[in-house]
Image (cartoon, rainbow, N blue to C red):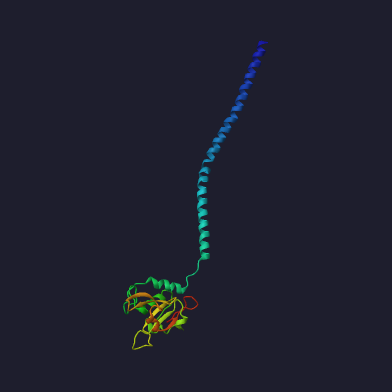
Amino acid sequence: MLEGKVRRVSLLIFVLLLSACSQTQPQVSKEVKKKVTITSHLRPTVLEVKEPKEQICLTKLSLSSKQSSTQEENWVPLKVEDEIEWNAKELLGHKYVWGATGPVNYDCSGFTRKIFADVGIHLPRVSRDQSTKGQLVSFNELKKGDLVFFATKRRHPNRVTHVGIYLGNGNFIHASSGVKQIVIFNFNQKEYYKKHFLWGRRVIRDNSHVASAI
């Protein structure tokens, strides 16, 4: 009887130990799995940190491309006459020197020749020859970008001796021998130039860089 009880107790202890071992092993394997899982996710985790940065950059790029495309859609080409006005005003204050063609000093026809050459329109050297190029326009027909010609010598009241560029609203820009520099005058404020005005010449065709006036 006693031996039978001892055997049963021993058997029970053996079963308990066996079941304890079987329960411990899966836990170990799970822990290992977790470690493996964590270890295997170390690199992906680093990559996941980098991915948002890359996505932000791409977003910025896409935004900038959208903005640039929007700007291109809203971009309006600069008209030739506006470019002429811009370039001419850049030289305001430069000294007038007879016979000078730049880049620092200019006479009247050297100034007009340089400004129109910058937009691809090539004029003769002297004002008298420039006054024969392009379309003839009267005072009331003047538009921005037209050449304006004057007779400033008393002995030759009909001979071209001076040239400027019309800017609109009665204003014109020229290298003035009287003021000794490049200035803007208004016909209504300078009656002398209105009185000695001969004609205008339009060498811009269809608002484009085509009118080679040679």
* Residue 46 left/right relative to 20: left
* Residue 57 left/right relative to 114: right
In front of the other: 185 or 202: 185
In front of the other: 73 or 178: 178
Quadrant location of the N terminus? top right
Q: Which residue is the extreme one toward the top?
A: 1
Indicate whether 40 appears above or below 20. below
Residue 149 sits in quarter: bottom left
Q: Residue at x 51, y 64 (%)?
A: 72
Residue 67, horizontal then vertical, whole percent: 51, 60
Q: Residue at x 54, y 40 (%)?
A: 40
Q: Residue at x 52, y 51 (%)?
A: 55
Residue 51, horizontal then vertical, whole percent: 52, 48
Q: Which residue is the extreme one toward the right?
A: 1
The reply to whether residue 36 is visible in this rendering is yes
Residue 9, horizontal then vertical, whole percent: 64, 16
Q: How many marks?
A: 0
Indicate whether 168 appears above or below 46. below
Residue 134 sits in quarter: bottom left
In front of the other: 49 or 164: 164
The reply to whether residue 134 is visible in this rendering is no
In front of the other: 61 or 94: 94
Quadrant location of the C terminus? bottom left
Residue 206, horizontal then vertical, whole percent: 50, 77
Q: Residue at x 60, y 30 (%)?
A: 26
Residue 5 sits in quarter: top right
